Image (cartoon, rainbow, N blue to C red):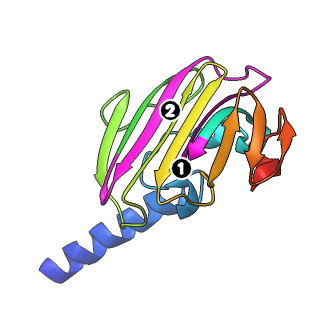
Amino acid sequence: ATRSTANQHQRQRQRLSASLWAPREAMSAPRQVQMDSINETEVVVHSACCCCYDGCVPELNNIGCAAQETLLCLEADVCCKSGTPCLCCGCCALRCVEVTVCCKTQSQFFCCVAGSALPPDSSVPCMFNVCFLSLFPKIGCCLKLGDMK
């Protein structure tokens, strides 16, 4: 009976994971904030220093705010955006995940977007920007995050 219960729990977790919005690179887990509703490649980076950035999205599709934070194996989501389903505790969720970074955060407040990761990863690459002027990894002005990866 214990083995079948454990198998049922495992199948339920797999179904939840399979029905979600993004792969692990985007911090996927059951009932996760839909940070992919913002196309990260379209974020115009305002400022960045090594493992963190601030930017804006020129279009305003989703009204509200959302955040997703990970510290080792603990992940938290908060979402107060229009058109998104409720998380397991209404507007928030907390869960254990596989360790891939020491700490990581992604957030959105209307058209403002921010992200940080230690160590930097594919969704938060190592960058250096000042007042929309990109100095690393590419030199340019008003570059999008997708252009700097």
Q: Position of residue 33 (x, y in %)?
A: 49, 39
**Residue beneath the point at 50% across and 45% down:** 116
Q: Is residue 85 left or right of residue 45?
A: left
- Magenta: predominant secondary structure element? strand
Where residue 39 sits, quadrant-wise, is top right
Mark 2 — residue?
Answer: 85
Amino acid of disc 1: Cys
Q: Which residue sits furthest right?
A: 140
Q: How many marks?
A: 2
Circle 1: is it few (<14), some (14-19), or many (20+) Cα within 10 Å? some
Q: Mark 2 and mark 1 in contact? Answer it, CB < 8 Å.
A: no
Closest to the observer, 37 or 3: 37
Could you say which quadrant of the image residue 25 lies in?
A: bottom right
Residue 106 appears left or right of 37: left
Residue 130 percent coordinates (x, y)? 69, 32
- Magenta range is 49-75
Provide residue 41's location: percent of width, then percent of height.
Answer: 76, 45
Residue 51's mark? 1
Q: Is residue 105 above or below residue 119?
A: above
What is the quadrant of the N terminus in the image?
A: bottom left
Residue furthest left in the image:
2
